[in-house]
């Protein structure tokens, strides 16, 4: 009985963790370049809409839909970058504005196109033949969709690029000391535009995964605050990719656990349960802030616009 | 979203006797009724708004009139007022709203335009030219609970619900009472998602229920997600708002369906005839008064059970009360005495559950 419960729960964790993981990784990339992006929720919303739109418009091809979701996130990021990198608008205001813009825009487009509550096939679980049929490990490890399996390599790639490659070094230099990077000949604008587009593509992909991979249906505002949790996850992870993945798994586990506790007939207070993800967010924030001595990789120029020779 | 959420609280107060002045005389219209409908969501939302849209079309056909419509008007006065005033400027004199969140704006507008008749679905405000209307949804859920009990192997039913308010709790209790008509050992495990419209949470809830061996899932949330999950898992489901066979032809065995036209047609006729007297407490509609009915039963419901559902539906039309006593809650406390019926005020504030319902606290 307990084993069944655990297997059922753990098997559901990856699907819930992936949107948090991809969104947090995307934000991490953006922030490493020194751009504070509070617009995560907005990138997710356009991703979710683009994903469902691609499927309803072009046929049930989840790969194309996810690519469209990433592209939509990246496209919206160009507007954001134009504001905060080129025009040097306050990044907090621009990020919040972006969320409201995306809420209105996706609601308008989705409802006028008639995409609300239209079920789609979407992503389906891969089958590993006999491996998927194994007891316990089968459901937990071998019955997920392709995005779940690709998430770990994507993290590895991002961690390698950020930590070990020349591009990553320049990107971090732009985020930590833009003046020095500028003096060394790195184009701050180009780097920030590029990092924001790449990161926003990941956040958009996370949104597309919500509509195409999990819900397989679209409604207005369907990201439901997950973008904000991703922002907190990046802080919790202290700008280190693998910690962000761990945090995402933690949140996925909570989200998968909540309905399962109720379905098992365990009587817990409903409002308390609904509060847990946010309580956990606050908890980890406090924990990270009060723990001294640990290495934080927070970019030193995070949230600061760069202007050459402007002190 | 919030449109029906707090209906319970506010309407409950109204029903509990926070008296509003009853109209002394029937509402007298100027000219023939020219009707317009203001939809909360897109008319193709597959649920609440689409049910209104379908009722609008049937009302048009029955009355031989045109009913103008505007969709996607959110629950804020700044969205509602211009939409309604534009209609009034163009000569419309019967305005139909469709959301809980329109209540205050409609009250204001009704006072500002006393010559215009206002109707508001799931609203809470009333006046001499304003009537809110909602349905006794527990009747349909009681009947769908019977269908659910009939298709479940062991009587383990689940229910994906929005929020623990009276308006939702009464559907869960009725569902369980209906199921026990067929299978006295039936249980209903309800999960509140905390939202009317979150397909991700609804899917999580439905999958969790299925993972516990539950084989019929009822719902009182706005997206068809629980139906779709049931179809994927090869189990059954019962729907809300419209006939959910559209989304899950095999899985969906019964649905609550809004037939607002059954209320709107006679009401618009009365407005035209100058005999309309809006109720100061709003119209709280039973099946026979034009409240929600059912689309039943799917092919997997045995004939005998389907006949019993039909018979119970007729019994409700003939006056049977779903919340008639004696009725005790799951802790054994008496809630309705023998021979009595639960009052409307007590319905709206229902926070207790009948035996067999399993919920969060």
Image: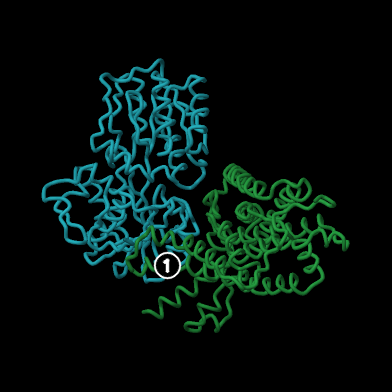
Chain colours: A green, B cyan
x and y percent of residue A195 in the render? 75, 60
Q: Quadrant of the C terminus of chain B?
A: bottom left
Pointer 1: what residue? B208
Nearest the eye: A257 or B356: A257
Q: Quadrant of residue B356?
A: bottom left
x and y percent of residue A223 in the render? 55, 55
Q: Residue at x 71, y 52 (%)?
A: A77
- In this rendering, position of residue B30 left or right of residue B20: right
Nearest the eye: B98 or A181: A181
Judged from this view, the residue extending furthest toward the left is: B338
Figure check: B211 above or below B54: below
Q: Secondary structure at mark 1?
A: helix
Q: Residue at x 21, y 49 (%)?
A: B323
Q: Residue at x 63, y 67 (%)?
A: A238
Figure check: B30 above or below B148: above
Q: Residue at x 59, y 71 (%)?
A: A292
- In this rendering, position of residue B271 left or right of residue B184: right
Figure check: A249 above or below B163: below
x and y percent of residue B334 in the render? 15, 55
x and y percent of residue B326 in the render? 14, 53
Determine the chain carrying the residue at label 1: B
Residue B299 seen in render: no
- In this rendering, position of residue B289 left or right of residue B320: right
Q: Residues within 10 Å of mark 1 (few under 14, many from 20)?
A: many
Figure check: B272 above or below A51: above
């Amino acid at each position: 009985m307990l084993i069944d419960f655990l297997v059922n729960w753990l098997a559901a964790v990856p699907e819930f963790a992936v949107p948090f993981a991809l969104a947090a990784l995307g934000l991490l990339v953006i922030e490493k370049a020194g751009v504070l992006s509070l617009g995560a929720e907005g990138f997710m919303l356009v991703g979710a809409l683009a994903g469902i739109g691609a499927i309803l418009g072009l046929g049930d091809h989840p790969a194309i839909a996810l690519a469209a979701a990433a592209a939509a996130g990246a496209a919206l990021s160009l507007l954001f970058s134009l504001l905060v990198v080129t025009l040097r608008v306050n990044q907090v205001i621009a990020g919040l504005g972006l969320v409201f813009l995306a809420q209105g825009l996706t609601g308008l487009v989705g409802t006028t196109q008639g995409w609300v509550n239209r079920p789609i096939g979407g992503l389906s679980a891969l089958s590993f033949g006999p491996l998927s049929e194994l007891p316990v490990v089968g459901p937990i490890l071998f019955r997920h969709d392709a995005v779940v399996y690709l998430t770990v390599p994507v993290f590895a790639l991002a961690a390698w690029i950020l930590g070990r490659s020349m591009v990553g070094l320049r990107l971090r230099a732009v985020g930590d000391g833009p003046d020095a990077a500028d003096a060394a000949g790195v184009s701050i604008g180009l780097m920030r535009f590029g990092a924001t587009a790449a990161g926003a593509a990941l956040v958009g992909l996370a949104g597309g995964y919500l509509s195409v991979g999990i819900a397989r249906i679209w409604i207005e505002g369907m990201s439901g605050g997950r973008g904000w949790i991703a922002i907190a996850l990046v802080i919790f992870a202290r700008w280190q990719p693998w910690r962000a993945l761990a945090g995402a798994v933690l949140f996925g586990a909570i989200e998968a656990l909540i309905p399962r506790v109720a379905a098992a007939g365990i009587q817990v207070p409903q409002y308390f349960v609904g509060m847990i993800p946010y309580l956990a967010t606050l908890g980890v924030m406090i924990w990270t802030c009060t723990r001294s001595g640990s290495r934080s990789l927070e970019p030193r120029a995070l949230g600061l616009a760069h202007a050459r020779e402007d002190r | 979203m919030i449109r029906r959420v707090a209906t319970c609280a506010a309407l409950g107060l109204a029903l509990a006797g926070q008296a509003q002045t009853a109209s002394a005389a029937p509402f007298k219209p100027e000219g023939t009724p020219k009707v317009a409908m203001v939809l909360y969501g897109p008319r193709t939302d597959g649920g609440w708004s689409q049910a209104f849209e379908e009722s609008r079309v049937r009302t048009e056909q029955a009355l031989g009139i045109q009913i103008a419509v505007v969709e996607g008007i959110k629950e804020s006065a700044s969205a509602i007022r211009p939409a309604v005033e534009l209609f009034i400027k163009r000569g419309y004199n019967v305005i139909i709203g469709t959301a809980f969140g329109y209540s205050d704006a409609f009250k204001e507008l009704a006072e500002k335009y006393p010559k215009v008749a206002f109707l508001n679905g799931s609203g809470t405000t009333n006046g001499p030219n304003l009537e809110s209307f909602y349905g006794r949804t527990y009747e349909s859920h009681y009947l769908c609970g019977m269908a659910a009990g009939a298709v479940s192997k062991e009587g383990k039913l689940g229910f994906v619900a929005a929020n623990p308010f009276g308006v939702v709790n009464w559907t869960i209790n009725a569902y369980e009472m209906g199921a026990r008509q067929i299978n006295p050992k039936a249980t209903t495990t309800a999960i509140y998602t905390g939202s009317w419209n979150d397909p991700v949470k609804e899917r999580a809830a439905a999958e969790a229920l299925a993972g516990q061996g539950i084989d019929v899932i009822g719902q009182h949330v706005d997206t068809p997600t629980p139906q779709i999950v049931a179809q994927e898992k090869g189990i059954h489901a019962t729907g809300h708002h419209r006939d959910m066979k559209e989304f899950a032809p095999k899985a969906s065995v019964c649905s609550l369906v809004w037939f607002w036209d059954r209320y709107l047609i006679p009401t618009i006729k009365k407005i035209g005839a100058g005999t309309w007297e809006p109720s100061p407490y709003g119209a709280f509609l039973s099946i026979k008064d034009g409240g929600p009915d059912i689309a039943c039963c799917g092919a997997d419901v045995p004939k005998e059970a389907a006949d019993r559902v039909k018979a119970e539906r007729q019994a409700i039309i003939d006056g049977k009360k779903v919340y008639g006593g004696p009725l005790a809650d799951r802790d054994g406390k008496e809630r309705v005495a023998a021979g009595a019926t639960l009052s409307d005020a007590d319905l709206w504030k229902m926070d207790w559950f009948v035996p067999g319902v399993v919920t969060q606290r």
